Amino acid sequence: MAKQGSLPPVPVWRGADYVRIPAGRYQAIATRHKGPEWVRPFSRWSLLVEFELLDNGARVCAFYNFGSNREGPVTMRRGNYFKAWTLANGELPRKGQLMSPDVFLEGQVFTVEVKDSRNDPAETEKAEAEIYSKVTAILNVDFAPQSRIHQSGIRNHAVT
């Protein structure tokens, strides 16, 4: 029980901060990933891949859904992750090959499509203040020399 005269606790936001930038195509490098992990509120497996835009340094995330099978994440050939992973890898996966998200962190320069995330999980339009930008597609990958990326000082890493 709180002491008399003390103020009640005030909630503090500790969630992710997502930026909002104009929709469009940008050059970017992947800087980290988180997951795949089970996301309880959505009852599904999800992966976050964060990209840093080369022109302005903004960090924008792509989100990949791996289904609701509690046994583990599932990659579908027609899924967004399969397409993105194949582009980042430079070739299709071989039968039985692990499709690790580390493939995004190998210094490639990605051309990404960025759009606003306007709907909530119930597909209801978000309030203007809640809208943020997200990577909706990887359009192209340039397997540039590593030195260009390392000179920028950006450190790529997985988040555990």
Image (spheres, grey):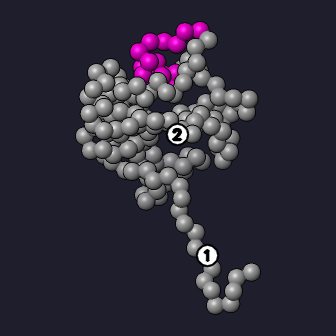
User: Can residue 97 be seen here?
Assistant: yes
Relative to 41, is 81 on the left or the right? left
Is residue 133 within the magenta segment? no
The residue at the point 41 percent across, 35 percent down is: 156
Looking at the rendered structure, the number of numbered marks drawn on it comes to 2
Relative to 21, is 62 on the left or the right? right
Residue placed under numbered mark 1 in the picture: 9
The N terminus lies in quadrant: bottom right
Residue placed under numbered mark 2 in the picture: 159
Point out which mark residue 41 bears. Answer: none
Q: Residues within 10 Å of mark 1 (few under 14, many from 20)?
A: few
Between 26 and 129, the one nearer to me in the picture:
26
Three-letter amino acid code of the residue under disc 1: Pro
- Magenta span covers which residues? 81-95
Mark pair 1, 2: CA separation = 30 Å
Which secondary structure is most common in the magenta stretch?
helix
The C terminus lies in quadrant: top right
Give the image quarter of residue 107.
top left
- Image spot of residue 65 (x, y percent): 58, 33
The residue at the point 32 percent across, 20 percent down is: 143
Relative to 21, is 40 on the left or the right? right
The residue at the point 64 percent across, 42 percent down is: 39
